[in-house]
Image (tube, rainbow, N blue to C red):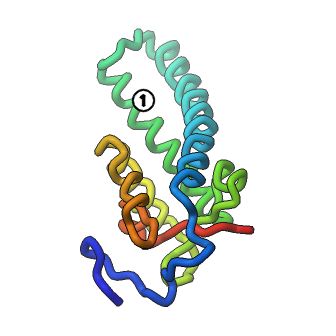
C-alpha cells in the first residue's frame, strides 16, 4: 500500500484500467443527480417549511434561524437520499444513467459510515469551489477528495 493525501490505497484494488470513470462522465452523473436529488430535497424541504410556517404562524425570511435550520434539514435529507442509493446497489439515478457504480476500495459492502464520509467529502469538494472534483482530472487514479476520504471509487458498470 502507498499513502496518498494521508490515505492508503491498495494498488491491487485500485489499478487504473478501462473501468476508471472519466471526468466528463462523472460530472454528467453529478449534474443529473444534482437536478434529481436537488428537486426532491427542495420539494420535501418546501413542504416541511410550509407546514412549520403555517402551524407556527412564522414567516420565513432568508437568513432567519428557521430558514437556516430548514437548509440544514435539506442537507440531511440529501444525505439520506444519496446514502440510500449508495448503500443499496452503489448507484444513484444519475450513476445508473451513466453506467457508473461506487464501490469500496477493499471490495467490502458499501455501508452508511462510508456514505457519510463520501457525502461530507463531496460537500467540502463543492465548498472549495469544486476543487475536490477537479482533482480527478490530475489524479493518476482519477479520484476525487470524497473518493479518497471515503475509501471508495467509481467504476463503469458496462
**Looking at the picture, does residue 40 appear above or below residue 61?**
below
Of the pair 38 and 6, the residue shown nearer to us: 6
Residue for point 51% across, 13% down: 54
Question: On the image, which quarter does residue 73 sit in?
Answer: top left
SS at mark 1 in the image: helix
Residue at 40%, 71% in the rendered image: 140
Q: Is residue 145 visible?
A: yes
Residue 101 horizontal/vertical position (percent): 63, 65
Q: Quadrant of the N terminus?
A: bottom left
Q: Which residue in the rendered view is the most extreme toward the right?
A: 158
The residue shown at (26%, 71%) is 5
Residue 18 to residue 46: above or below: below
Dot 1 crowding, Cα within 10 Å, few <14, some 14–19, many 20+: some
Q: Please tell me which residue lies in front, 29 or 74.
A: 29
Mark 1 lies on residue: 70
Residue 29 in the image: state x and y as whole percent: 60, 49
Amino acid at each position: 500500500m502507498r499513502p496518498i493525501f494521508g490515505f492508503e490505497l491498495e494498488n491491487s484494488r485500485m489499478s487504473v484500467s478501462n473501468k476508471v470513470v472519466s471526468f466528463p462522465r462523472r460530472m454528467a452523473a453529478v449534474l443529473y443527480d444534482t437536478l434529481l436529488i436537488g428537486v426532491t430535497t427542495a420539494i420535501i424541504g418546501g413542504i416541511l417549511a410550509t407546514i412549520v410556517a403555517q402551524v407556527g404562524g412564522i414567516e420565513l425570511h432568508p437568513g432567519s434561524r428557521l430558514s437556516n435550520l430548514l437548509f440544514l434539514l435539506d442537507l440531511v435529507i440529501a444525505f439520506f437520499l444519496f446514502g440510500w442509493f449508495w448503500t443499496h446497489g452503489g448507484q444513484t439515478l444519475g450513476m445508473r444513467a451513466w453506467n457508473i457504480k461506487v464501490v469500496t476500495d477493499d471490495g467490502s459492502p458499501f455501508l452508511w459510515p462510508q456514505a457519510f464520509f463520501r457525502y461530507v467529502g463531496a460537500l467540502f469538494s463543492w465548498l472549495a469551489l469544486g476543487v475536490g472534483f477537479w482533482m480527478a482530472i490530475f489524479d493518476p487514479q482519477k479520484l476525487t477528495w470524497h473518493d479518497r476520504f471515503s475509501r471508495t471509487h467509481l467504476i463503469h458498470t458496462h
